[in-house]
Image (cartoon, coloured by chain):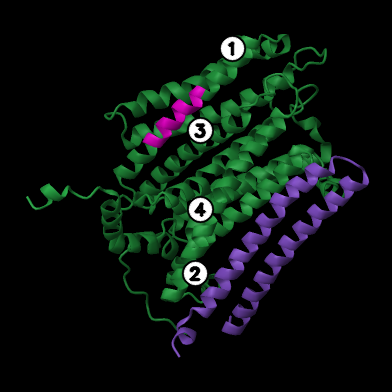
Amino acid sequence: MEHAPAKPHPDAALLRPIENPGRSFYYIVGALLLIISYTGFVYFRQLWFGLGVTGMAQPVTWGFYIINFVFFIGISHAGTLISAILRLSKAEWRRPITRMAEVITAIVLAIGGLHPIIDLGRPDRMLHLFYNGRLQSPLLWDVASITAYFTASTIYLYIPMIPDIAILRDRGVKPRWLYEFLSWGWQGTEKQHKVLDRAMNILMVMVIPIAVSVHTIISYIFAMTVQPGWHSTIFGPYFVVGAIFSGIAAILVLMIVFRKVFRLEGYLKHIHFNYLSILLLIMSIIWFYFTFSEYLTGFYGHEPNEMRVFWYKFAGDFAPYFWAMIALNFAVPVAILCNRKTRTILGILIASISVIIGMWLERLIIVVPSLANPRLPYPTGIYIPSHTEWVLFIGGISVFILGYMIFARFFPVISIWEIEEGRHESAKIVTERITSYMPDPEPSTAGE
Amino acid sequence: MNKKTIEALQILSLSLIWVLFTGIAVWIVSLIRESLRLHDAPDASVGISIVAIPVFFTLASILTYVFIGLRKGRKEESEP
């Protein structure tokens, strides 16, 4: 069927990356594919020679792979959780942000979820889970919760995309069969809107406990052992707070990049960055409070094994990383974001990158020092990541960038129909809401 | 690709989602049976599965509701 040339759309800026991606898209994809191919080669080398090619050895048997697993899953909290909270709280400024955030979740979860398989050395051992898995083990809870979160996030990303996919279908964008297939006959009727709204309302409520459970359960992998530095009752909420913290930072970085690359200044305004950066500032303070509580209780107990890990982090081999973590997660963002003059787009970018690096260091600080100082009479362990681990780390980041670019090539990164809906209905909805909760004027003064 | 092929693919994808989630439920049930056989904390396994299985089936039900609802809500069917 022939299609008439697409009419100019009021949100043409959001369709431009799909209809006219430009040469630079293909150059960057090519460069990323080269990095990913090399990563694949390095991984097959690890498969061939075994985990001996990594820096992991007794007693430090978890290294970069588990650090990156916890880090990537943490970043995934950016999307669905924050999007669901903003939707539930009817924050109108969410409209240009939610989809960008939701895409992060779907891609990063897939990457993070692969890391324990890489860490196994022999991926065929995953089959043991199916035959001989022990459901009472936190490792299996992780498999179940990550699978549930990945599924829920993907559905939560996809369902609000259906009206936008229909826009692309109706404009005759290629591959048309893909948009036809994914739009499920969307025509924007009242009945269809009702179905979509109802499904999104159920998903919003469902996704929040699933997201919280994911990082809580990841923390249980550590906290349910009696390893010094890990056996803590606040690890669950501490991990969730850290995940949301790093997630917000990741959204901010992506928003700034997309704003610049796709010239979305009209959609991602300073007010969006201001609101999200204040949220980042609050999370930074909450994160510091949890970190302080975690180490203070450990120090006050003064249990000898616990103290070995404590001093290893505070004044030993890991002190530079520990204090860098405090500076990057607390001092830098608080200093930049507290001051309105430095809370500019550049300042927010610096604070967000600082938090992302700081949160990666936090995962390093949690995983390695406890394993390096076990309760058993081992000498203090040494962990130096090998070339293989660095390459797989860079490869993971490249897969994320590639995944996001491919998504942005085929689908709008900002929800077009939600922006249109916001333009027409937001003011009315917000006015009605404010009127509903504001007290009525006193009868004596009402007529004055 | 014609409309009938696309419709067949849509129905196939919905069926596959149910196959996947039923597979996950069967896997979880088999792990409970294993823990019962080994007397290895079956109560914990049952506790986890009570939460996990309904989550997957709810997600599959939401997708089914959306897909069927969107098809039923199309103009040709909504306007007699």
Residue A356's tag is 3
Of tags 3 and 2, which is closer to the observer? 2
Asked if labels 3 and 2 share a chain, the reply is yes
Q: How far apart are the two marked residues, 4 and 1, measured between alpha carbons?
A: 40 Å
Query: Which mark sits nearer the N-terminus, 3 or 1?
Result: 1
> Does mark 1 fall on the same chain as mark 2?
yes
Q: Look at chain A in the picture and name its colour.
A: green
Chain in purple? B
- Tag in front: 3 or 4: 3
Identify the amino acid type marked 3: Ile
SS of the residue under disc 1: helix
Question: In the picture provided, is A64 more to the left or to the right than A59?
Answer: left
Of pointers 3 and 2, the one earlier in the residue sequence: 2
Mark 3 belongs to which subunit? A
Magenta span: A278-289
Location of mark 2 (residue): A195
Under mark 4, the amino acid is Met
Q: Which mark is residue A314?
A: 1
Question: What separation in Å lies between label 2 and label 1 (alpha carbons)?
Answer: 55 Å
How much space separates mark 4 and mark 2, taking CA atoms? 30 Å
Q: Position of residue A207 (x, y in %)?
A: 56, 51
Q: Is residue A286 magenta?
A: yes
Observer-nearest of A444 and A35: A444
Callout 1 amino acid: Phe
Q: Secondary structure at mark 3?
A: helix
Residue at x 80% of width, y 58% of height: B26
Q: Name which of mark 2 and mark 1 comes first in the sequence.
A: 2
